[in-house]
Image (cartoon, grey):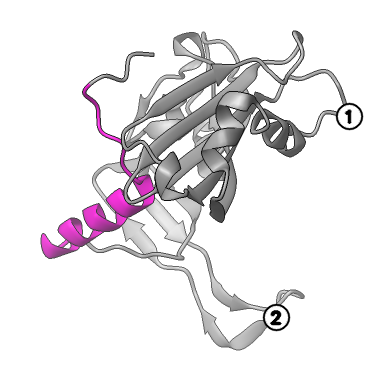
Amino acid sequence: MSNKGNYVVSLSNLCKWLGQQAESLGVEIYPGFPAHQLILEDGAVKGVITGDLGVAKDGRHKDSFTPGMELRAKYTLFAEGARGSLSKQLGEIFALHKGCQPQKFGIGLKELWELAPGQHRKGLVLHGMGWPLDNETGGGLFLYHWGDNLCSVGFVVHLNYKNPWLDPFAEFQRAKTHPAIAKIFAGGKRIGYGARVITEGGYQSVPQLSFPGGALIGCAAGL
């Protein structure tokens, strides 16, 4: 929970910049092409096949149909995020989860705000735990001031909650009514939002990471 001396950055902006650096070094990037199928030969991963494009809802090939590409490599790193489809297959094929605890997941919701100039404190980091969740539900709030009057605020709810009526998005909105939080957004404007599943199981839930021909990294590995 120590944030002294660190930097607050936009991960999406960082990834765009890293992509430009990679391409300048000759790396090929294929945005919008999902990895659809594993290439398995002689008990090892040899790469992946991307998904077909131009397929109608009924499975018919449209005029724009483009078959998936084989992308072969000496080593393939899988960074699909939490519960990626190929990562799940790899876990079963190579028994990567043997001897470790089941993974635990949470839903993370985030908003990007443009604050009124008087409310912005560049570099401010706030973390909150619990409220407005009950004692049976884990989660909490995070808030980062960065850029020119920008603020990223989000809320995480552990997905093992027992109350079937709990609405993670509604709890997020309630969290923003806390006096310490609400004043920050007075006169501001929400300019973006999103959500994603995150892994929360900890070290005891991290599977075996490497296998013949590749490895799991990032949230696919539960890191």
Residue 165 numbered mark, or none: 1
Q: Can you say whether 159 is above or below 119 in the image?
A: above
Which quarter of the figure is the C terminus placed in? Answer: top left
Q: Circle 1: is it few (<14), some (14-19), or many (20+) Cα within 10 Å? A: few
Q: Is most of the magenta stretch helix, strand or loop?
A: helix
Q: Circle 2: is it few (<14), some (14-19), or many (20+) Cα within 10 Å? A: few
Amino acid residing under circle 1: Trp
Q: Position of residue 37 (x, y in %)?
A: 50, 53
Amino acid residing under circle 2: Arg
Q: SS at mark 1?
A: loop
Residue 60 numbered mark, or none: 2
Whether 8 is among the magenta residues is yes
> Marks 1/2: CA distance?
40 Å
Q: Which region shows up in magenta? A: 5-26
Q: Can you say whether 11 is above or below 102 in the image?
A: below
Q: Can you say whether 169 is above or below 187 in the image?
A: above
**Could you tell me which residue is drawn at 55 percent across and 19 percent down?**
128
Q: SS at mark 2?
A: loop
